Amino acid sequence: MLYQLYEIQRSMVEPFADFAQAASKLYSNPRSMLSQGPMSQRMAAGFDLVYRLGKDYEKPEFDLRSVDVGGVDVTIRERVEVSKPFCELRRFKRFSDDPKTLETMLSQPVVLIVAPLSGHYATLLRDTVQSMLGGHKVYITDWKNARLVPLSEGEFHLDDYVNYVQEFIRYLQGKYGQCHVISVCQPTVPVLAAVSLMASRGETPPLSMTMMGGPIDARRSPTAVNNLAQNRSFEWFENNVIYRVPDSYPGAGRRVYPGFLQYSGFVAMNPDRHAKSHYDYFKDLIKGDGASAEHHRKFYDEYNAVLDMDADYYLETIATVFQDYKLVKGSWEVRSPEGQLERVRPQDIKGSALLTVEGELDDISGSGQTRAAHELCSGIAADQRQHLEVQGAGHYGIFSGRRWREIVYPQVRDFILAHQPPCATEASAAGHASSLSSSTTITEAPVPSRRIKAA
């Protein structure tokens, strides 16, 4: 019933949001009589803020049209390589008519970025993708909004997530012979499970795994997210946050954790920060600071766009990761597409290198939660493991923004190159020779879970 009430409320607010948008334009358009008054700019800013607070935010586009590869501007085209009921494997294919650039791109590593299915769309990793495209063939998991998936497609469980990841890894291995995997936040757990199961079966694992800001061991440095999951029972979540999709959507009748409830939880974690951000936006509009205002719009266009998650997947994640800690306790069993239960054994992984990344100020996945992967992956040799802690970075700072681009990405890039077969890196290695020669992460003999601090 709550979902239906939300839809009614949204329908009622929509006309007022449209009116606020029109009023803002009337007060800001220099050809309008309303723009001539002493309070015009303030009125325009106020109506614009009202519009943005009341508008409906749809799924954003990646909007990545080109990238620099070795000083050459390369065109990018998105396309779906594999389509599953709840996810698409999306490729960012690069095109160039420069022979040398083509040779370089062909030799670059293949990277599967596993995006979070935790409320926001995969476009939250736009900055991650954009950086990676300069030196890698990039694929990403683009998760679908569960309210748009018809009931005829069946349910979606945490086991299905793990199986999807395995299928995508096998697809890339079949196409290129090998690949690297990067997981950001929530998917660090199912990705580690997927690679573990592949290793236990004797399949070829990815060349490397980069795990960033994820709850591998949610018992360590618990955050507000962890505390909520720990302090509420499984039944509480099932009875209080799970609702059925209204009839107006293709997924009508599907049990989901609605996006609007997730968004309320996001904002409730830092209400003062969001209130200040909106007030600063209002002041920037009055001052005519277009750059700051546009930065605010871009952030909240992404932050406010949320998706529904299938109830089974969400509840099983709560129980497995945040309440029973099945991964770290060694009790997690995943059901394969054939219906067979398989025990997740990270200690069986031997052919993959492991890099973990944490932000010093991460309030989503606390300090040590991601680093715990090193203890679980005891079969990976000491010189194949690295840990990076980014000082001054919060959760989003390790995969987006200046710290990502200047600190984290160079480390990730060099780590991947260091574990790429030499025959496949000759051309790309030349372009990164200077960074590799100065990188302590790659050239020095590492130790298990070595901690690298970066300012």
Image (tube, rainbow, N blue to C red):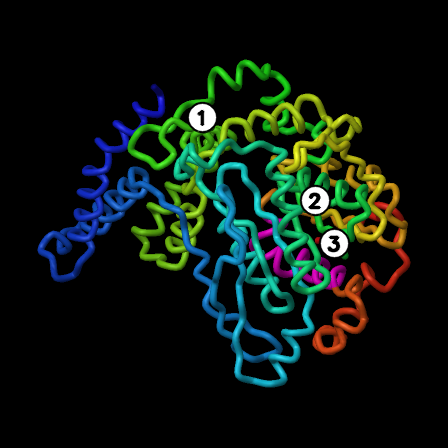
Q: Does 359 sit above or below residue 69?
A: above
* Residues at marks 2 and 1, CA–CA distance in whole angstroms: 33 Å
**Quadrant holding the N terminus:** top left
- Mark 2 or 1: in front is 1
**Residue 206, labelled with which disc?**
3
Left or right relative to 267: residue 447: right
N-term-proximal mark, 3 vs 2: 3
Q: What residue type is labelled 3?
A: Pro
N-term-proximal mark, 1 vs 3: 3
Residue 335 location in percent, x, y? Answer: 67, 32
- Please name the residue shown 57% across and 47% down the image: 115
- Please name the residue shown 61% across and 60% down the image: 405
- Mark 3 or 2: in front is 3
SS at badge 2 = strand
* Residues at marks 1 and 3, CA–CA distance in whole angstroms: 34 Å
Pointer 2: what residue? Answer: 358
Task: Look at the image and give the residue range highlighted in magenta.
Answer: 397-416
Pointer 1: what residue? Answer: 255
In depth, the one of 180 and 266 nearer the eye is 180
Q: In which quarter of the image is residue 36?
A: bottom left
Q: Quadrant of residue 149?
A: top left
Neighbour class for label 2 at 10 Å: few (<14), some, many (≥20)? Answer: many
SS at badge 1 = strand
